[in-house]
Image: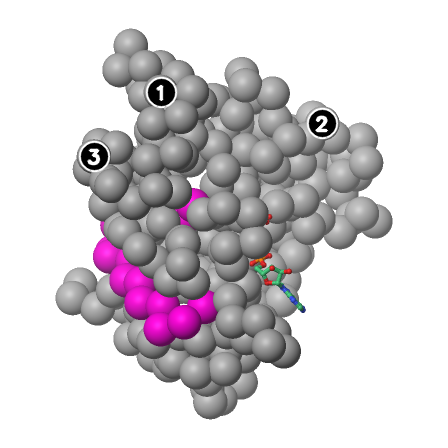
């Protein structure tokens, strides 16, 4: 598949040396509880990064800090080299156009059709006419493997896998360079999850995307991710390939990758 034409190249002006995401010295606390302590993480351009960690290790809080949905207690988050705090409205809007997010439940508008859901960011961020918005939205829907018969369905009429695909099409609507995925395969059966993994891998390659993906799915880590960042002990304890992590002596990483599910995923990946 060839890359889709960009809506506005000027807003995207890629700076090859600047990592799309840099988190430095991040601290997040809730009352007496410290969730992150001096957490550092860099996502390189074009990288597909999986983010794993035990339940409650702070993956969602990290994502929200990066997206500016939560104000960290200390530290800084740079997106494309820009500190996300203190941006003007127009700078923030520009940054939003360079990023897409697929939330865990898809976060679709229940009263809008598939076509309208995917077109919503285009209507909000561009001056395109309704007809052109529909045309671009239809193209994005085709990119995620759904046909025109889906255009006029409402979210309640879709399967879980279709909802994820529509959420992905919407996240791609503005031709982002950087995509955040929160548990993309959660709730899908193994065949649906494998198909979604394949879709993510194919799209990221053809569109040259950088991906930050929270996941519990070991198969996804093996099938899709270039590197995996492990959240434990309130920080990123390792960022490495799955093969390197298999050799780690960190107790949580050993348990995760060398436990029965980890071994099964590794065996599946090498078949
Ligand atoms: N608004 C909040 N107020 C108080 N505590 C919070 C709040 N949001 C998150 N926490 C706490 O911060 C910790 C990290 O939560 P987070 O949702 O980031 O974990 P997670 O790694 O995404 O977990 P899971 O894999 O179960 O989704 C948890 O202990 C959670 O209870």
Residue carrying label 1: 263
Q: Which residues are magenta?
A: 36-52
> Badge 1, how many Cα within 10 Å: few under 14, some, many 20+?
some
Query: Which picture quadrant has residue 228?
Result: top left
Q: Closest to the observer: 87 or 57?
A: 57
CA separation in Å, label 1 and label 2: 30 Å
Q: Earlier in the sequence, mark 1 or mark 2?
A: 2
Question: Magenta includes 49?
Answer: yes
Q: Nearer the viewer, mark 1 or mark 2?
A: 1
Q: Is residue 26 above or below residue 218?
A: below
State whether label 1 is within 8 Å of ligand 1.
no
CA separation in Å, label 3 and label 1: 13 Å
Q: Nearer the viewer, mark 2 or mark 3?
A: 3
Quarter of the rendered structure image containing ligand 1:
bottom right
Residue sitting at 40 percent across and 59 percent down? 233
The secondary element bearing badge 1 is classed as helix
Q: Describe residue 1's horizontal placement relative to residue 165 as left or right.
A: left
CA separation in Å, label 2 and label 3: 39 Å
Residue carrying label 3: 247
Residue sitting at 43 percent across and 83 percent down? 74
State whether label 2 is within 8 Å of ligand 1.
no
> Badge 2, how many Cα within 10 Å: few under 14, some, many 20+?
few
Residue carrying label 2: 159
């Amino acid at each position: 598949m060839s890359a889709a034409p960009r809506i506005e190249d000027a807003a995207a002006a890629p700076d090859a040396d600047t990592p799309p995401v840099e988190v430095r010295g991040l601290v997040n606390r809730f009352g007496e509880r410290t969730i992150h302590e001096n957490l550092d993480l860099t996502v390189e351009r074009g990288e597909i990064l999986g983010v794993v960690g035990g339940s409650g290790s702070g993956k969602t809080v990290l994502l929200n800090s990066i997206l500016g949905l939560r104000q960290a207690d200390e530290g800084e988050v740079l997106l494309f080299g820009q500190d996300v705090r203190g941006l003007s409205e127009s700078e923030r809007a520009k940054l939003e156009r360079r990023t897409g997010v697929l939330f865990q439940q898809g976060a679709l508008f229940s009263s809008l059709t598939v076509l309208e859901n995917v077109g919503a960011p285009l209507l909000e961020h561009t001056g395109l006419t309704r007809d052109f918005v529909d045309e671009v939205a239809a193209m994005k829907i085709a990119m995620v493997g759904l046909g025109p018969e889906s255009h006029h369905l409402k979210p309640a009429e879709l399967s879980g896998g279709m909802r994820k695909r529509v959420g992905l099409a919407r996240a791609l609507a503005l031709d982002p360079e950087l995509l955040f995925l929160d548990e993309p395969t959660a709730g899908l059966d193994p065949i649906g999850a494998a198909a979604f993994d394949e879709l993510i891998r194919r799209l990221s390659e053809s569109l040259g995307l950088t991906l930050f993906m929270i996941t519990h799915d070991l198969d996804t880590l093996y099938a899709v991710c270039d590197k995996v960042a492990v959240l434990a002990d309130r920080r990123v304890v390792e960022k490495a390939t799955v093969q390197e992590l298999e050799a780690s002596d960190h107790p949580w990483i050993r348990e995760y990758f060398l436990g029965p599910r980890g071994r099964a995923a590794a065996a599946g990946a090498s078949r």
